[in-house]
Image: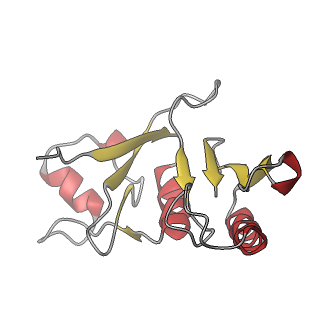
Amino acid sequence: MANRFQLVIDCRDPELMARFWAAALGYVLEPPPEGFATWDDWRRDIGLPNSELGMGADSIVDPEGGGPRIWFHALPDVKVVKNRLHLDIHASGGAGTTDRSVPLATRRQRVDAEARRLTELGATFTGVLGDDDDGLDHYAVGMQDPEGNEFDIN
């Protein structure tokens, strides 16, 4: 049996990151626990200090329940090195990076459209990672989220 897990992303602005990644992944902001109007109400109830309040939404969930919960952990540190772990967003229409049932031109259009959408939400385009000019039947782009964490769209 597989272990359940949540993905934790360290960041300076949890609500900004939660909203960006919810929109990027089709997730939703996680509602506060039952019986609490806000996350701050819950945080007060479990005894967290005032310094832990006021960060707003800091977690997102898959509305269909299939993907992991993602928690954005507030830390004052600034990212200084390349991520050792990153997300690949599959936007090309294939079932994954090895699925070539969708023509390359169509996959390229879909990846570029998703890159434009996420750029409008605050991401930064960092470059093309593969295209038909390199002889491979693969196209992907590199991106960074609003705090500089790398991710790919393929």
Q: Left of 39 or right of it: where is 29?
A: right
Q: Left of 55 or right of it: where is 2?
A: left
Q: Could you tell me residue 61's position as x and y percent? A: 33, 64
Q: Quadrant of residue 5?
A: top left
Name above or below for residue 53 compared with residue 101.
above
Name above or below for residue 72 compared with residue 23.
above
| Residue at the spot 74% in from the left edge and 63% down from the top edge | 119
What is the residue that sits farthest to the top in this orientation? 81
| Residue at the spot 13% in from the left edge and 53% down from the top edge | 45
| Residue at the spot 69% in from the left edge and 60% down from the top edge | 122
Q: Quadrant of residue 103?
A: bottom right
Question: Looking at the rendering, in which quadrant would you find the C terminus?
Answer: bottom right
Q: Could you tell me residue 68's position as x and y percent? A: 31, 55
Relative depth, front residue between 132 and 54: 132
Q: Could you tell me residue 148's position as x and y percent? A: 66, 41
Q: Could you tell me residue 74's position as x and y percent? A: 43, 40
What is the residue that sits farthest to the right in this orientation? 133
Name above or below for residue 81 compared with residue 153.
above
Colouring style: secondary structure
Q: How many marks?
A: 0
Relative depth, front residue between 48 and 83: 83
| Residue at the spot 34% in from the left edge and 67% down from the top edge | 62
Name above or below for residue 140 compared with residue 106.
above
Relative depth, front residue between 52 and 91: 91
